[in-house]
Amino acid sequence: MSNASIWHGVIPAITTPFTADGQVDHDFLAKHARMMIDSGCKGIVPLGSLGEAATLTFDEKLAIIRTLVKALEGRAPVIPGIASLSTDEAVRLAREAKALGASGLMVLPPYVYSTDWREMGAHLRAVISATDLPCMLYNNPIAYKTDFSPEQIAELAHEFPNVQAVKESSGDVRRFAALRSLLGNRLELLVGMDDAIVEGVAMGARGWIAGLVNAYPKESVKLFELARDGGADAAAELYAWFLPLLRLDTVPKFVQLIKLVQEKVGMGSERVRAPRLAMDGAEREAALRVIDHAIAHAPVI
């Protein structure tokens, strides 16, 4: 498995399943990851925003990496998200991830604290230099309140050979053109927002860190391949069906919503870890209308 290849195709940001008593459900996690790969996905990203990583303890994170590496047996890369409250803990997590067999790292800004490039850049440099694993920078200013500009990302790419990719989730598709103009093909570009996948591929993205894939893996892979091989026109029909679901990935309760879709299609449980609570009331009913409509009109893949 060459390092360059780990950033191509559909790579699920896998959800973290919980048992009825609130523990990580490792049996289901392993089964779910294998199902993603069997459906044509190219890797697994645990411990991201969708994985509720901020609610997981350090030891739970290590246990999740261990389970996934064992479950996939080298068939596909495990690329954990590296984020924490402190730089020291993020560095420790990166080193432990390598020791446990991770193939790459998704490097995030720290939780809670957001500030200037001097501090945020120092945090990223510490994590990137902690191992020699290939790294994907994750830019999600909406969730993390830290925005890494194309110029700042280019600075890190020039400084560190193991910075190989960027997951761009600013919602501004123009960032792809800006990165290309600064770096050419130096970095692999990946889409990080489900409802921008066709647009992102048109701008040169080679990979998709996907969310709704947890419920619809075959459809996600097909959509990506149509957009990659035939462009927006080829993907239009499937995209039109999928978009109402994909938009659930870009709202504050995206974790609860995606897990609800998983439960409705028999691909998991809607259990989340507090402070999140399962959807209820009018909000739940509105989501179920979208989900039920999608299920009733699901395409044959």
Image: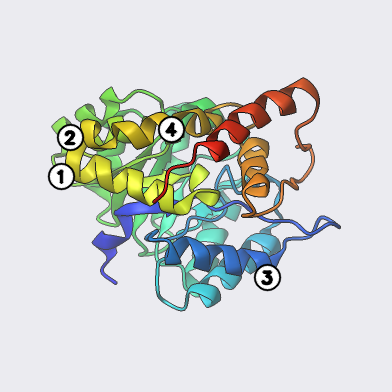
Q: Amino acid at mark 4?
A: Trp
| Residue 289 position in % (x across, y down) | 64, 27
Identify the residue at horizontal 37%, vertical 33% (top origin): 239
Q: Badges 4 and 3: C-beta atoms under 8 Å apart?
A: no
- The tag on residue 180 is 2
Q: Secondary structure at mark 2?
A: helix
4 relative to 234, above or below: below
CB within 8 Å, label 2 to label 4:
no
Q: Secondary structure at mark 3?
A: helix
What residue do we see at 54% from left, 77% from top?
70
Relative image position of residue 248 (x, y in whole percent)? 55, 31
Task: Inspect the image, locate mark 2, and give the three-letter code of the amino acid beneath it.
Answer: Arg
Kind of residue indicated by mark 3: Asp
Closer to the camera, 135 or 1?
1
Residue 241: numbered disc: 4
Residue 27 disc label: 3
Q: Earlier in the sequence, mark 2 or mark 4?
A: 2
Which numbered disc, 1 or 2, marks the residue that appears first in the sequence? 2
Instruction: Choose the circle earlier in sequence order: 1 or 4.
Output: 1
